[in-house]
Amino acid sequence: MSEFAVAPGKLNVGAVFSQAFATLQSKLLFFVFTGLMVGVASLVGTGGHFVLIGILLTLVVGAVAQILTVRATTCPMGVDAGTEFVPAVQAALPKFVPVFLTSLFVQILVSVGMFFLVVPGVFLAVMLLVSTIACILEDRSPVEALKRSRELTRGNRWRLLGLVLILFILAMGVALLVAIPTAVAGIVPGIGALVGRVVASAAEGLLGVFVAIVLTHAFLELRRLHEASAPAPLI
């Protein structure tokens, strides 16, 4: 029996992470470029006096980075990230508006749920977890993407909650690892604080890229399970 064997029709969380790590390793340079792009935007956004502009820049770059990551996860590409990266950014721009709006709708719905009660917020977050992936890979409108995520996650939301918890634990581990060099750098007068912010921003960007890779593989597996369980078309 396979190491990641699960009940039929259920999401194999272990296999999803295994595939995500394999994808990360196979296109490492491209994903590093993407993560650093997010890190630079985050660094600029938190380092200036124009807070709103900084937040907007971070959201815009984050949406573009998610498009890049999802497409790189599902499409073959060469090993030279330097020559692949700029054309990939140009190809991602036309999808920016629907992806940005989808992400915004998800954040609003989850925030409203969290405001009234934590449980509805968590439920909505899991139900809409792969909305932006559906928007990118299936060229859906924001509303259609939300419905698609609700459809695909049905029957696997407890497993997806477990996946989210694993990602949360991973994020906490990365934060602890980053805190050590950041604290050491802070001792150095002058540039210490800047170095710490650079390290933290880079780690945040790279972690965000890995999360997008994991969610992409989760979406692909959920879609496969959904199509396998769908009734055969009438002839």
Image (cartoon, rainbow, N blue to C red):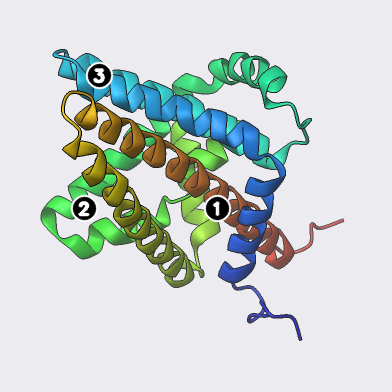
Q: Where is residue 82? Give x, y as percent.
A: 67, 20
Of circles 3 and 2, which is in front?
3
Of circles 1 and 2, which is in front?
1
Q: Where is residue 139? Give x, y as percent.
A: 61, 31
Sequence-wise, the earlier of marks 3 and 1 is 3
Q: Where is residue 3? Give x, y as percent.
A: 69, 80
Describe the element under mark 3 as helix, strand or loop: helix
Q: Amino acid at mark 3?
A: Gly
Q: Amino acid at mark 1?
A: Val
Tell me how far mark 1 sits from mark 2, CA to CA: 24 Å
Q: Which mark is residue 113?
A: 2
- Mark 1 lies on residue: 214
Find residue 140 and report its image quarter: top right
- Mark 3 lies on residue: 54
Residue plotted at (61% across, 54% down): 20
Q: Where is residue 104? Give x, y as percent.
A: 33, 33
> Can the viewer see residue 136 in this picture?
no
Q: Nearer the viewer, residue 176 or 142?
A: 176
In the picture as drawn, the residue positioned furthest to the bottom comes out as: 1
Describe the element under mark 2 as helix, strand or loop: helix
